[in-house]
Image (cartoon, rainbow, N blue to C red):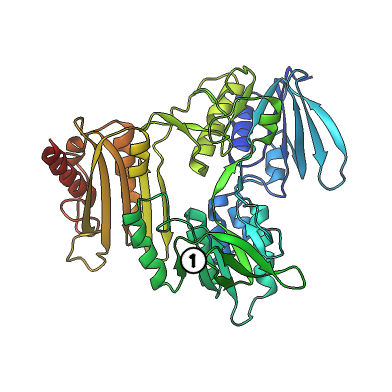
Amino acid sequence: MATERLVVVGGDAAGMSAASQARRLKGPAELEITAFERGHFTSYSACGIPYWIGGQVPGRDDLIARTPEEHRARDIDLRMRTEVVELDLPGGRVRTRDLDSGSEAWTGYDKLVLATGARPVRPRLPGIGAHGVHGVQTLDDGQRLMDTLQRTEGTEGRRAVVVGAGYIGVEMAEALVARGYEVTVLHRGPQPMATLDPDMGALVHAAMNRMGILTVSGAEVTKILTDDRGAVRAVATAAGDEYPADVVVLGIGVEPRTALAREAGLPLGESGGILTDLSMRVRGHENIWSGGDCVEVLDLVAGCMRHIPLGTHANKHGQVIGSGVGGGYATFPGVVGTAVSKVCDLEIARTGLRERDALAAGLRFVTATISSTTTAGYYPTAADMTVKMLAELRTGRLLGVQIVGGAGSAKRVDIAAVALTAGMTVDQVVSLDLGYAPPFSPVWDPVLVAARKAVTALRAAG
């Protein structure tokens, strides 16, 4: 008999990374691992779903990093289509339901990992459950959307409405254009990409317009209109407008899937995410860990807990959790909020704080925005690039960077991410010894130019 029993709830990035790392540290004779996944797929790239829908990734299975069979070959008892419906913390057990047969069972544990992920926000609107309305968070969600799209493949005049203009909304809009749809994006904010400040979001708006995507700002969706078969036919807004649709994709955002944790009395933060310590242990519970899109993490710049659902974090959480479960030691110190995306040829990146984040944190700051090119201006591949930088008054500490531009723009945000993590000032950023050659950068990299302008703004502000 194994000396310890580990139960993992959730079979994607954080959960299976934790299980795999724990297995590396402890063999089957020391640790019995059982994992439960409610969907049909495990260990896949949810971030790649828009690129599969759009055709850049040839097939669904290309997004799968490790199959259930591969996990089982490593002595991880992975049970698919099995949902955990109750946590009995005093009894050290979980109640599961087989989603195909409906049968239920209890499974005991000594150590528990909660990696339940996040779910798409579905506003309570008339018609929200109509055929043809899709959220896109899991590979199962992506497959359902693909099935809907393929049923009308080749039909002329197909129309899609995307509700929301965050990362998923913008990426799905591009994917639907690639599939031949006439696309409308409806969102409530002043500009798309609320992860950016509105002045930078305006650049994204212009790029979407150039792609032929109708992007309607300040649009509050009030109803999904259906036909006599119960299928979506249009989306209505508070302004009284109706936008015809054969398919609707919800890109409003996600919320942590933490109903199990809440019902069990585990600690949750303001966003509803599970609260953990630096080793990803659930606060106040020695033998329970949690990671991935269901937790809140420390924002190293603002100094507060936030829900930032990204696959990069989830995989790191899993490694930290697996080390702890397996008897080792590791910590996850926090994040600076780095993310990148694209709309056609326009690359979008941000890290650190936006203006409204800095204001909410009680910080006083200056901003600096510059226009440059991705390479030396005379080089044939030079593309326009805009960089916005926030710096704290008095200290000069870098607070945030946003970048919008052509090919070669987005990954420059990594310079800023390292600087933020190190707590560097914009003066120090100006002095960074970055690589230079005309095919890669102007002699003054745009990030350094923005930092130099921020230094000038700080001096002017006294």
Q: Position of residue 425 (x, y in %)?
A: 22, 34
Q: Is residue 113 left or right of residue 342?
A: right
| Residue matched to label 1 | 174
Q: Is residue 180 left or right of residue 93?
A: left
Q: Position of residue 340 (x, y in %)?
A: 41, 51
Neighbourhood count class around disc 1 (C-alpha, 10 Å): few under 14, some 14–19, many 20 upward: many
Secondary structure beneath disc 1?
helix
- Asked whether residue 455 is in view, the answer is yes
Does 118 sit above or below residue 185? Answer: above
Q: Amino acid at mark 1?
A: Glu
Which residue appears at 77% of the width and 71% of the height? 229
Which residue is nearer to you in this view: 1 or 250?
250
Which residue is nearer to you in this view: 216 or 71?
216
Splitting the image into 4 quarters, where does residue 335 fall? top left
Which quadrant of the rendered structure holds the N terminus? top right
Does 51 sit above or below residue 314? Answer: below
Which residue appears at 49% of the width and 38% of the height? 313
- Asked whether residue 56 is in view, the answer is no
Q: Is residue 106 left or right of residue 134?
A: right
